[in-house]
């Protein structure tokens, strides 16, 4: 216990010291917010963006699961929820005002979290990237701060199976406790169908419904998403996707992005050995098709019913690739 406490103190001191040493001055390009569902390919894309010279990177600043969790700031929002229940989709007026203040602090790199992996000489950074999970309903709020939104999406079946394997909580249970909120976005038919899944459905159905709840706002309702990237395109057509990211986000160093893309990401510790082996071998087809053998025809049919009910047309349970092209 003493060892862990000492190590934690050293890491915190190093992080705070680095923040004081590195001078942040906003450059010409807008800061970036990466929005995604958990287990949705966000770590890989975030690693590529964080590797850009001069990029100041925050990894999941709102997540209580991370050491960089802004606990003291979020406590002021009076959010009395358990560790995995924070989704920030139903903030009241006072909480929303405080959240705007917190976002402004993140947008100007004034909080003692985050890091810059490759600074300009001498120790300067000029752009910020936030990797944000479990807060997709704040997409427009981030955009109103002048930040550029990139939405990273992974096939709902692959993402759902990963969440199930790890035994994580189904976020749909959190959303469907707030029916008055959902009525602003979902039809009565969709709400009834979602409740039926949560009471009678399989674990796979609940996981797919959770994917829908976590991704539907930036995917279908927001007009502020400037870059939409499908994980399957990134794996199967890397050169095309890196060119798209470079052009859309004004990212210059595509070589380092390609290098990072060829290696397992930090979150690969949550992957199976077969997945890590496929990444190391560069076998994109094996990587993308892996989930197909884990689903029965009944699972595919049930999953497709959910996508159809919520008008999600970018994926099908019967195809590993998105229905949309790289923009």
Image (cartoon, grey):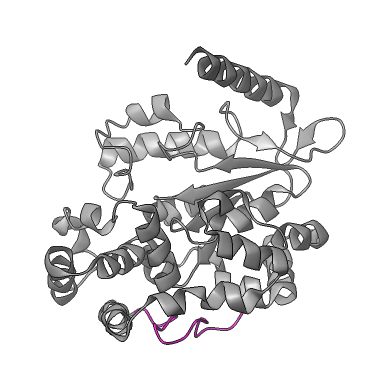
In the image, residue 4 sits, relative to residue 302, either above or below, namely above
323 within the magenta span: yes
For the question of whether residue 257 can be seen, the reply is yes
Q: Position of residue 156 (x, y in %)?
A: 41, 71
The quadrant where residue 180 appears? bottom left
Q: On the picture, is 78 further left or further right than 17?
A: left
Q: On the picture, is 22 further left or further right than 64?
A: right
Which residue is drawn at the image coordinates 44% and 80% (left, top)?
Answer: 314
In the image, residue 29 sits, relative to residue 317, either above or below, namely above
Q: On the picture, is 105 further left or further right than 47?
A: left
Which residue is drawn at the image coordinates 40% and 75% (left, top)?
Answer: 294
Q: Which residues are magenta?
A: 312-327
- Counting every numbered tag in the picture gives 0
In the image, residue 168 sits, relative to residue 126, either above or below, namely below
Residue reaching furthest to the front: 273
Q: Position of residue 232 (x, y in %)?
A: 57, 74
Query: Which quarter of the rendering shows the C terminus?
Result: bottom right
197 within the magenta span: no
Q: Main secondary structure of the magenta part?
A: loop
Which residue is drawn at the image coordinates 21% and 55% (left, top)?
Answer: 173
Q: Position of residue 196 (x, y in %)?
A: 13, 70
In the image, residue 231 sits, relative to residue 54, either above or below, namely below
For the question of whether residue 230 can be seen, the reply is no
The quadrant where residue 253 appears? bottom right
């Amino acid at each position: 216990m003493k060892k862990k406490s000492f190590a934690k103190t050293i890491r915190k001191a190093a992080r705070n010291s680095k923040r004081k040493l590195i001078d942040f001055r906003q450059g010409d390009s807008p800061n970036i917010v990466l929005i995604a569902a958990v287990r949705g390919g966000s770590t890989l894309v975030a690693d590529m963006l964080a590797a850009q010279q001069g990029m100041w990177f925050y990894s999941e600043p709102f997540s209580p699961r991370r050491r960089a969790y802004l606990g003291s700031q979020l406590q002021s929002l009076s959010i009395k929820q358990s560790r995995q229940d924070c989704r920030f989709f139903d903030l009241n007026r006072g909480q929303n005002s405080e959240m705007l203040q917190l976002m402004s602090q993140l947008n100007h790199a004034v909080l003692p979290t985050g890091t810059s992996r490759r600074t300009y000489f001498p120790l300067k950074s000029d752009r910020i990237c936030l990797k944000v999970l479990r807060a997709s309903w704040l997409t427009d709020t981030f955009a109103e701060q002048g930040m550029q939104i990139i939405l990273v999406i992974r096939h709902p079946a692959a993402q759902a199976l990963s969440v199930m394997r790890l035994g994580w909580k189904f976020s749909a249970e959190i959303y469907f406790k707030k029916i008055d909120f959902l009525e602003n976005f979902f039809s009565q038919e969709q709400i009834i169908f979602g409740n039926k899944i949560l009471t009678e459905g399989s674990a796979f159905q609940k996981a797919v419904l959770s994917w829908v709840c976590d991704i539907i706002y930036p995917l279908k309702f927001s007009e502020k998403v400037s870059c939409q990237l499908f994980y399957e395109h990134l794996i199967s057509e890397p050169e095309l996707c890196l060119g798209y990211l470079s052009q859309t986000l004004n990212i210059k160093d595509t070589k380092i992005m390609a290098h990072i893309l060829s290696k397992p990401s930090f979150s690969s510790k949550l992957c199976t050995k077969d997945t890590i082996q496929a990444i190391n071998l560069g076998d994109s087809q094996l990587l993308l098709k892996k989930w197909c053998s884990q689903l029965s025809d009944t699972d595919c049919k049930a999953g497709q019913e959910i996508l159809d009910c919520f008008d999600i047309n970018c994926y099908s349970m019967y195809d590993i690739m998105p229905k949309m092209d790289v923009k």
